[in-house]
Image (cartoon, rainbow, N blue to C red):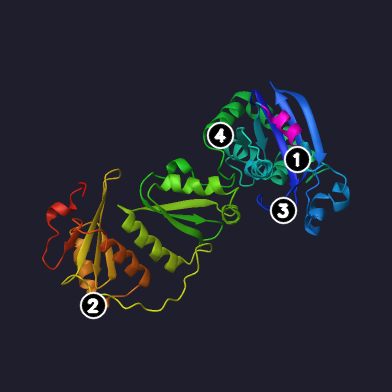
Amino acid sequence: MLPCYVVLDLETTGGNASQDRITEIAAVRMEDGQEVARWSTLVHPGVPIPPFIQSLTGITDAMVADAPDFAEVAPELIRILDGAVLVAHNVRFDHGFVQNELARLDMALKTKTLCTVRLSRKLYPQHKGHGLDALLLRHGLHTETRHRAMGDVEVVLAWLRVVTAELGLDQVRHEAQVLLQGGTSLPPHLETSISDIPETVGVYLFYGEGTRPLYVGKGVHLRTRVMSHFQSANKVAREMRLLQGVRRVEWRETAGELGAQLLKSRLVKELQPVYNRKLRRHEMPALPSWPYSGPVAIREHDATSGRTDIHVFDRWCHLATVQDPAALDEALQARQSLVFDLDTYRILLKRLTQPAGRDPSVFSLNRTELTPDAWVDQPN
């Protein structure tokens, strides 16, 4: 498949790489299609193993009582990984645990990674399940030691042999190389192609299996902002919990940061995402006078996408965000039903109280300053 790789599997005390610990490591090193090293060891985690994990893996506190701790086995792990691609089923899990354990020793893990869950998705897109149990069933594989580190390593190795025989070495190698070049921080269950997300300003929504979003965020560069979540997942427990459930990403472009702030605020209230901070009740502030004689429009333009948004406000209320004069007329006709929102007020107040000097993107609609030129795609 690859010139040099190590199939690795871990057993752990739980699923959180920043809090839980490793209890078993198994690794098989392959060079030019041949096995050149095999190693496994129990590891003393330094914490009790939860009863559920003991039942799942068969690894008990008694079994690891005299086992070496991670600091003792780290040199051998680094030696077997040296110069190789780390291959694992859901590699972010194993890579994250090794990274965190080494970080506690002030050591860094420098190796490329390849996820065989993602490889299975690439090779067999017609199938839905790509976990180890699904692969065992689909390809007629067998193991007596499921949920033990070396047993799961042997399942992955057997699967690689089967798919190479079925599809050919060239196809398996090609798809593996594509994945190596495509960013290994991504979870294997992510159905959205990160390359499809634009590097424009806007709002992104993380979804799990259901229709209610898990999280709504905003970014000036959407793809970079989304990637930052995945890259920090192994270091931040809250990010890990969130991203373990993410299946797809949706996004909505805006013409500027103000539009993204307004859209995120509205979507959080409407959709009630699971991981966004709960809305708190605030005492109503003493509102300053509306500094205009009537409604105003704030123009935002994104030179990259060519998008122009006009945000319409009156008396601290957001009427609408529009892209053409006809929609502006409709928004102005809706002024009789103004709805005050404290978050919108704070966003707008910050924008209107920026350092001295008239903001050229703010147009007074009472004096019809929003000329036809304002709708032309040109920078402010």
Residue 62 image offset from top left, x and y in percent: 88, 51
* Left-right relation of 368 to 199: left
- The mark nearer the N terminus, 4 or 1, is 1
Give the extent of the magenta segment: 74-82
Question: What's the CA distance linking mark 3 and mark 4?
Answer: 27 Å
Q: Is the Cβ of the residue at disc 2 closer than 8 Å to that at disc 4?
A: no
Question: What's the CA distance linking mark 2 and mark 1?
Answer: 69 Å
Residue 79 among those drawn in magenta: yes
Residue 312 image offset from top left, x and y in percent: 24, 64
Is residue 185 in view? yes
* Residue 179: image tag: 4
Assign a secondary structure to mark 3: loop
Question: What's the CA distance linking mark 1 and mark 3?
Answer: 19 Å
- The mark nearer the N terminus, 3 or 2, is 3
Q: Nearer the observer, disc 3 or disc 2?
A: 3
Label 3 sits on residue: 14
Label 1 sits on residue: 71
* Residue 336: image tag: 2
Q: Nearer the observer, disc 3 or disc 4?
A: 3
Assign a secondary structure to mark 1: helix
Is residue 142 in view? no
Outermost top residue: 32
Q: Is the Cβ of the residue at disc 4 closer than 8 Å to that at disc 1?
A: no
Assign a secondary structure to mark 4: helix
* Left-right relation of 362 to 278: left
